[in-house]
Structure formats: C-alpha cells, structure tokens
Image (spheres, rainbow, N blue to C red):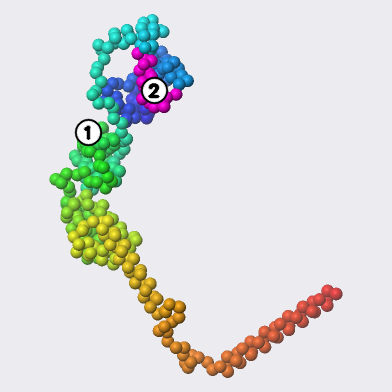
Amino acid sequence: MQRPDLYEPELNPVYAAMLEHYSVVADPARVRDPNRKGTVEHAIGHTQATALKGKRFETLEAQNEFLEHWETNWAAKRIHGSERQQVQAMFEAERPHLKALPLLGMQYFTQGVRTVCDDSCVRVDHSSYAARPAAIGSKVLVRIFDRRIEIRDLQGALLRTHAKAERPGSVVLPADERVFNPSRETRLILRQAKAIGEHASRLCELMFAAEGRVGQRKLWGIVGLTKRYPARCIDGACAQALAQGVYSYKHVQTLAERLFADAMVAMEEGANDGHDGGGDLVHADPLAQQHALIRQGDEYADLFTHAAMVSSAAVSRAMDEAQGGQGGQS
C-alpha cells in the first residue's frame, strides 16, 4: 500500500493488479484494533512457528513439498483452537461458496509513466512501441512484463499490448501508423543537417522520407556527430553512405571516424615533411650572415665589455659595504 487510508487507500500497482486478477477486494483494517482485524494472517505465524521452526531447505520446491505433506497429514486434521472444529471440515463447509481460480496465475510486472514521443511511440528499454490511440505528448502507464508490454492510460484502461522486443533499438510500429509529416523537431534536425553540408542534408531527408518520424533518432545521431568530428568529415561520410546506398547512422559514424583518423595521419605526415629521420632540417634555409638588422661584431664586443665593467663595480661596492658593516659591529 503506497498511501494508507481507511476509506481511500492508494494501493501498490502490482498489488492492485493482483486483486483485479483474482477478483477479490482488499479490506483495510484499523491499526492496533485486533477486534476488527481478520484472523487469516494468523495462519502464517502458525505455519512458521510449527511446521517451519528450526528447519532449512535447499530449494523452494523442497519446502513446498514438505508443507504439502504437513498440511495434508497434520494441519488439515487438527481441531481449531477457537472454533473447536476440524480444519478440513470447516474448509469443506466453505468450499461451495468459493470461486474457481483463473487458469493463469498472476504475472508480475514493473510499471512506469512514459510520454508519447513525436513519432507516436513510447520508449521502453531503448526500444519503441506504438502508443495509439494515446495522443502525442500525453502521459501513459507502461507495464513491463517478462514477455509483453502493456500501454494504459492514467486511469488504467488498456490501450495497446505488444510482444516484448528481443533486442534494444527495435521499433514495434505498424507501417500504416508511421507519421511522415514533418514536425517542428523534424525541421530543427534538417536545419542542423543542412549546416553540416549538402550531403548530410540530403541523407537525412532521404532517411526521414523512408522511415518517418520514428527514424528521427538516427537523424539526431548524425547531427550529434559534430560534437566529436569536424563537419567536413561528417559530410564526407554522408557522401560515401549515399554512394553506397547505406542509410544508417552507425555506418555514417564508422565512416566519419575513419575519415577523421585519415585526416589526422595526413596532418602528422605533413608536419614531418620538413625533417629527416634524425630530426635535422632537410629543406631549411641557410643562416643569413648579412642583414640590415644584424649589427657588426665590434658593437657586440663593446656591449659585453661594458656589461662586465658594470658588474665588476657592483661586486666591489657590495664587498666594501659588507666590510664596513663588520667593522661597525666590532
């Protein structure tokens, strides 16, 4: 129970589905009021304290086999403490009023809320499932079973049932339900593809014409390659994909990665064209000996001599100051 309430309790979706499956009603009892609470739960404590106390089983099947033997040969034949009747006799009196169980047992599921996407599908585990008659942009409940998917409205009414896709990336959408008219999202993707280049724009237009809005995820993948590769590499990859007739995001990604790697190798080779194997310049120009900005050697000699004299005078002055300080201290 998600929200306890005596009059309008909010039940867990799986528990509510179990009640609906077996056509029973959950009757909430008051807290700490044993006179209003049924005694049905006492059977669990009685079983744990009597049949299962101090015992361990390797498998669930072994435990159920033991409990069936215990139920048949001891629990059903015992005299009930408060009713003073045999348990089996009480059950036989109630049997005519009991309904038969459904042929199939309760199947457990996980449930979540999804938004119907621009292509009229909902995404479940990276696969797309048709959600009509739910409107695009609306919220729906999705129940994920072991082998099927159920799409329901927020009130719980069943809208669609699909077999669960065997691999991620599948599209469970009939051909007559595909949406081919471009939306605002479609126009945005095509504008971004046009900014990449002519071939990228053409490829994305052909992919949308072939698959409709459900193919927009592939278009987003192509325009998203600009985060990793230059537009020129992506446009070149789209040109090769058009020439090969392979309209696939994965194929374009592989081609763009290859073109980018080739471009990097070409740049490294171009940078090394001016060097031999030992790292010496092969085509370097010889050093110039005469130029208007190059001074005569005598000028550099005079500069070095002047700097040496200034440095020597500074050292002598510093030594005199140091000696004078020592004489003052003594």
Viewer-closest of 7 and 240? 240
Q: Position of residue 110 (x, y in %)?
A: 32, 35
Badge 1 or badge 2: first in the primary sequence? 2
Q: Position of residue 120 (x, y in %)?
A: 21, 45
Residue 245 vertical placement versus 268 (above, below): above
Q: Amino acid at mark 1?
A: Leu
Q: Please give left or right for residue 308 compared with residue 180 in the image.
A: right
Name the residue: 42% across, 87% down: 285
Name the residue: 22% across, 47% down: 119
Is 228 colored magenta in this rendering? no
Viewer-closest of 117 and 304? 304
Q: Amino acid at mark 2?
A: Gln
Q: State the extent of the magenta-drawn residues as a range.
A: 56-72
Name the residue: 29% across, 35% down: 146
Q: Position of residue 97 (x, y in %)?
A: 25, 12
The secondary element bearing badge 2 is classed as helix
Q: Which mark is residue 63?
A: 2
Residue named by callout 1: 158
Quarter occupied by the C terminus: bottom right
Q: Badge 2: few (under 14), some or many (20 or more) residues near its Cα, within 10 Å?
A: some
Q: Write down the quadrant of residue 103 in the picture.
A: top left
Residue 322 vertical placement versus 136 (above, below): below
The answer, for residue 141, to whether it is visible in the render is no
Is 62 colored magenta in this rendering? yes
The secondary element bearing badge 1 is classed as strand
Q: Write down the quadrant of residue 296 in the picture.
A: bottom right
